[in-house]
Image (spheres, rainbow, N blue to C red):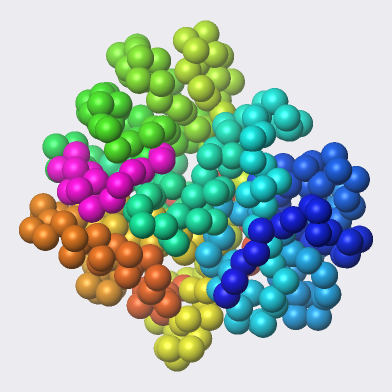
Amino acid sequence: MEIREFDINGYSNERIMIYGTTVGGKMIFQCLQKIGIKIECFVDRRMAGKEFCGIQVKEPEILKQEQGMLLIAVTRAFKSVCQFLEEIHFDRAYSCVNLIAGKQKEDFEYEEDEQVGVTDFLVKYPLYVNGFHKKKLVLPTLEVFITERCTLRCRDCSHLIKLYKCPKDYDINATIEYLQNCMEAVDYIEEIIILGGEPLLHKELVRLLEWCSGADKIGDVTVISNGTIIPGQELLDVMERTKTRLRLSDYGKLSTKISEVKRICEDRGIKCFVLRELWTDMGPIHEHDYSSDELKSIFTDCPFAYDLLLLNGKLCRCAHVAHLNNLSMINSSAHDCVDFTGFPENIEEKRSEVWQYMNIDYLEGCQYCNGIKNSIQGIEPGIQESVSNKC
């Protein structure tokens, strides 16, 4: 479907809705406020029934009846939103690149922990809007999984960490090799996100950060931690030198070290921000026997369909599906992943494979998911389970 650019000069007092209730939605809301435009509502499944920026949030399904202009203010889920809108025949959707063009983070009001998100939205939003229509193959974000070990055992972990019976660290030499292979096929990666498990448990994290800092095709590097570990001095030194960012997931009383880690990072000049978010309960893992049309609908409506994860050399558009394959619970890698375990013999063919992969209709692994529409939204993150199996 065609997504037009919102043109303030052509606006004539029509009803406006904003799709997205994260920092991007807040930024677009503020842009409209400054030019005297009021919005009707926000649209977002996980926040439906609540308020955001003092405005009511509604279910995406209301767009089947609601009339007006819809401004899309999401990044990773941008294409999924467009596919959903096309499916319901909503044809008055607009991107907001012009609204944020030339803006700096100082032009917005935000919480302390939203500062990095504001900066990222200004850089990455135009890429998600335009990136897959350009000749250059730019990945706005690539998550890199380095360890199954974790200090928590979260019941609803999308990476299924609790199912790894003998959790282990992944070989950093192999991880670097897979990243190099991937970088041969793409033009640039705006941000590498290093995660687990708990990546601060990996003793060779320092070496991975040093390698990433010297890679020409990598922009920002972010490490995600659960706030239970204080980084060691060597790691802090490297993070400071390489300008690595630290994102702390706040799980309340479980994240016992958050305040101390934030203070240490501030003293060292390391960018550190806290993310508090609600999770989704995707339900028990079993084959649902969906039809091909149902699979396409589930994939189209999923906000996680562009969460690119590199796991054991396989690039996958869904962490849940990637780990199901890694755990040998399903066998859909041939369709659901791009293999970077070996150096691409033909770079152009591998690039073409990635292009095609970014435009597939569904993952076969979606058969083992409730789908966002059928799942419980906004559940408490970090609910712990007792350890029932030991290696």
Q: Nearer the viewer, residue 76 or 51?
A: 76
Q: Position of residue 343 (x, y in %)?
A: 10, 52
Q: Which residues are magenta?
A: 176-191
Q: In the figure, 76 relative to 242: above or below?
A: below
Q: Position of residue 258 (x, y in %)?
A: 55, 25
Q: Is residue 370 visible?
A: no
Specify the principal SS of the magenta part.
helix
Q: In which quarter of the view is residue 102 placed? A: top right
Q: Nearer the viewer, residue 200 or 96?
A: 96
Q: Position of residue 283 (x, y in %)?
A: 52, 70
Q: Nearer the viewer, residue 275 or 107?
A: 107
The residue at the far front in this view is 9
Q: Residue at x 39, y 55 (%)?
A: 308
Asked if the magenta segment contains residue 182, the reply would be yes
- Left or right? Give the position of 215 relative to 63: left
Q: Is residue 214 visible?
A: yes
